[in-house]
Image (cartoon, coloured by chain):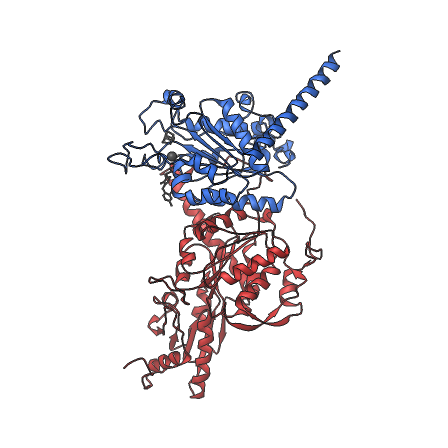
Chain colours: A red, B blue
């Protein structure tokens, strides 16, 4: 096995395999005005991906097609359109079992179609990175932004991160490979963003140098053998556990599941280092604390400005990582808050439920929710907060009374 | 795989399980002319199995594993079903992930191995039941063929869902009464061999596993053609003796009955033109090699 470092040598496109920490944290950045989809392409250009498998679904189709262009330019080992999301996630698994760094993108119904694969990915310890550009999954058919699908991903054993902006997305995609490929983690990552709001809007994003890329994935650091016949095959077991209804079988399955969740726990230390914490806290001593993930954080920031103009002080907690869940961080950040406001883009309020299950005096948690593609104007958040504080507000136009 | 890799450090030899010692010393890795005749004199790549006693799937497994031309660089992909009870005992890397997605897994796997090992042979072989291949996984079976993915698909056709207790499957015969077909199956056995040909497979064989030499031939052809040209498909009758009410000793006869000229498993083969050329070329080369060897031996003896 190669023990020599590849750092400093070049790939076939002439990019230097950089020390990832240097590349992400010290190397000069160039500001660019890009759509979220273009940002995904630029991150992958620098990620040294072996295999990307694509399938069209709004709002990730553009990003998935742009990565095809990268393949045509020679930046990716292989790329093709699969036949469905269920098949694509199987193809991603096959490529990852074979020792490749694998990337894919999906959204909404695609996520749901593929669902059987995700606990399998986690169970097989495949560090696949999947971008989820969330959209509605309800009937009647919707392509609008809605984050309900994230709640389904949260119990698959995958790591789940929720980006607020295109800049988050760019950085976290590259850092995501570093976290998931750690031998003590080696789990798949669902890197989510709110479709359209992030994918289809232009934003200033600071990019790392185009002539630097991540070092290649080394499948021989994995905690499970790579299926390439480069290490000796062994008979895995005398009786496949699926056949047995006995204690040893149950204990094996149980400990395997526990190990997956333990691996997710072990990702904390790496994620904290790379993302500078699982959450980000601003003004935690305010009586009113906005706690959110994704673009709901941005809307919360706007609401904060409006409220401060009226002399109402507001703190903000941005949750970056949903799995592993930042339990301690959230308890600590919310300990002084009297009102915890959780704005969400989904009908069930899964984030508010998670938070309620985490903290004492959970009746403090309320939140405005929109769904089905509705936007969340900061005024809705402002109105909700005033309501919580017992301040009388005039009914908003168009909402009836 | 470098054959060096499976060697055991001498100091460790005696603490390794005997089956592994055997694998290192007596398995036929690295020998292209390996075949079914090695069974009994070499270490097989299947250790045991937990199939029903006398299940023809076990014969099929042994013949196929003995016939792989390149086991040291072959990765197999299975699916859920009776076959998944055997794979944990197999001495080459194999993947089980979900029920029916085997050809999707194999597509990704083959491409990853091609990216990672340019210029080296890495064969991928799928082995799954008829339910996996034809019913739940049909989409992925066909799409892999449409895309001309370079791996072999083998279907163990026992004409029903054995592992879940004998339910109707698409490859079941019309009229057969089974679980979930309480008044007999309504439609004909799906003609997957014909569909395979139309879908772009370069080599398609429909037969039983009654004859090991035949299995060796078709497995080798299928793998060589998949390696060089495109997808290949073998549909092998491996009757589920349990569900059709046969005894352990009766599997072989059942296969012999089913392969009679008018029966549904009479030997049928399709081979595309480029595949034909490849096999002719390989046969000619092999002949040359053997002739040269003979000459050399004759020279030594003279
Ligand atoms: C998604 C999913 N659906 C259903 C099953 C249940 N299941 C397990 S094995 C099997 C039948 C397998 O039949 P076949 O592929 O013909 O293989 P055989 O057991 O006959 O060899 C079924 C339906 C499953 N494991 N996963
Ligand atoms: S149930 Fe049928 S196919 Fe499965 S092992 Fe038994 S005889 Fe073989
Ligand atoms: Mg079957």
Q: Position of residue B289 (x, y in %)?
A: 67, 23
Residue that protrudes farthest toward the bottom in the picture: A310
Q: Position of residue B104 (x, y in %)?
A: 48, 45
Visible residue check, residue A336: no
Residue that protrudes farthest toward the front in the picture: B273
Quadrant in the picture for the N terminus of chain B: top right
Residue at 38% from the left image edge and 38% from the top image edge: B131
Quadrant in the picture for the C terminus of chain B: top right
Give the vertical position of A398 relative to A360 (above or below).
below
Residue at 57% from the left image edge and 31% from the top image edge: B276
Query: Regarding ligand 3, which quadrant of the image does it lie in?
Result: top left
Give the vertical position of A159 relative to B198 (above or below).
below
Examine the image and state in which quarter residue A207 appears: bottom right
Residue that protrudes farthest toward the left in the picture: B183
Q: Position of residue A291 (x, y in %)?
A: 43, 72
Give the vertical position of A225 relative to A381 (above or below).
above
């Amino acid at each position: 096995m190669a023990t020599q470092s590849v750092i400093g040598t070049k790939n076939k496109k002439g990019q230097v395999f950089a020390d990832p920490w240097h590349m992400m944290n010290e190397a000069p950045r160039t500001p660019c005005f890009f759509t979220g989809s273009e940002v995904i392409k630029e991150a992958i250009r620098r990620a040294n991906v072996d295999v990307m498998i694509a399938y069209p679904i709004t709002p990730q189709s553009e990003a998935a097609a742009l990565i095809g262009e990268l393949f045509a330019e020679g930046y990716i080992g292989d790329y093709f359109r699969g036949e469905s999301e269920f098949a694509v996630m199987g193809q991603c698994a096959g490529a990852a079992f074979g020792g490749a760094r694998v990337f894919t993108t999906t959204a909404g119904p695609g996520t749901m179609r593929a669902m059987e694969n995700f606990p399998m990915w986690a169970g097989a310890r495949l560090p696949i990175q999947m971008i989820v550009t969330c959209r509605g999954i309800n009937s009647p058919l919707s392509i609008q932004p809605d984050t309900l699908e994230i709640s389904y991903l949260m119990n698959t054993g995958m790591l789940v991160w929720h980006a607020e902006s295109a800049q988050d997305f760019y950085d976290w995609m590259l850092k995501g490979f570093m976290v998931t490929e750690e031998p003590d983690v080696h789990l798949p990552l669902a890197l989510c963003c709110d479709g359209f709001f992030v994918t289809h809007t232009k934003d200033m994003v600071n990019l790392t140098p185009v002539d630097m890329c991540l070092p290649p994935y080394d499948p021989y650091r994995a905690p499970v053998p790579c299926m390439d016949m480069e290490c000796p095959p062994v008979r895995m077991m005398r009786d496949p556990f699926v056949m047995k209804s006995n204690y040893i079988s149950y204990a094996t399955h149980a400990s395997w599941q526990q190990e997956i969740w333990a691996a997710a726990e072990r990702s904390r230390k790496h994620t904290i280092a790379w993302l500078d914490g699982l959450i980000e806290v601003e003004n935690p001593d305010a009586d009113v604390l906005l706690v959110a993930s994704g673009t709901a954080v941005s809307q919360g920031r706007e609401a904060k400005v409006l409220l401060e103009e009226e002399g109402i002080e507001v703190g903000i907690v941005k949750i970056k990582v949903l799995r592993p869940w930042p339990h301690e961080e959230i308890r600590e950040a919310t300990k002084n808050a009297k009102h915890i406001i959780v704005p969400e883009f989904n009908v069930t309020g899964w984030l508010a439920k998670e938070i309620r299950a985490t903290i004492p005096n959970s009746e403090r948690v309320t939140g405005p929710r929109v769904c089905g593609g509705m936007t969340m104007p900061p005024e809705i958040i402002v109105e909700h907060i005033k309501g919580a504080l017992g301040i009388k507000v005039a009914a908003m136009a168009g909402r009836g009374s | 795989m470098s054959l060096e890799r499976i060697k055991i450090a001498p100091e460790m030899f005696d603490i390794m399980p005997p089956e592994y010692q055997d694998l290192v010393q007596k398995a036929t890795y690295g020998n292209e002319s390996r075949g079914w005749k090695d069974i009994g004199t070499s270490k097989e790549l299947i250790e045991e199995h937990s199939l029903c006693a006398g299940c023809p799937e076990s014969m099929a497994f042994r013949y196929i594993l003995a016939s792989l031309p390149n086991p040291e660089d072959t990765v197999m992909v299975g699916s859920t079903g009776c076959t998944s009870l055997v794979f944990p005992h197999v001495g080459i890397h194999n993947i089980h992930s979900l029920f029916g997605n085997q050809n999707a897994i194999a597509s990704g796997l083959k491409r990853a191995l091609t990216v990672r090992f340019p210029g080296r042979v890495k064969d991928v072989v799928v082995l799954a039941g008829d339910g996996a291949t034809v019913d739940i996984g049909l989409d992925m079976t066909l799409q892999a063929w449409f895309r001309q993915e370079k791996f072999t698909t083998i279907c163990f056709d026992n004409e029903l869902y054995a592992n879940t207790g004998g339910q109707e499957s698409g490859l079941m015969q019309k009229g057969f009464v089974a679980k979930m077909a309480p008044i007999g199956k309504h439609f004909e056995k799906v003609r997957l061999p014909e569909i395979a040909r139309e879908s772009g497979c370069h080599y398609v064989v429909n037969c039983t596993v009654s004859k090991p030499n035949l299995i060796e031939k078709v497995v080798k052809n299928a793998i060589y053609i998949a390696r060089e040209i495109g997808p290949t498909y073998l549909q092998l009758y491996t009757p589920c003796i349990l569900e059709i009410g046969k005894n352990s000793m009766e599997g072989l006869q059942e296969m012999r009955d089913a392969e009679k000229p008018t029966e549904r498993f009479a030997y049928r083969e399709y081979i595309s033109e480029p595949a034909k050329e490849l096999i002719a070329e390989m046969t000619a080369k092999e002949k040359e090699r053997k002739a040269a060897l003979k000459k050399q031996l004759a020279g030594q003896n003279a």
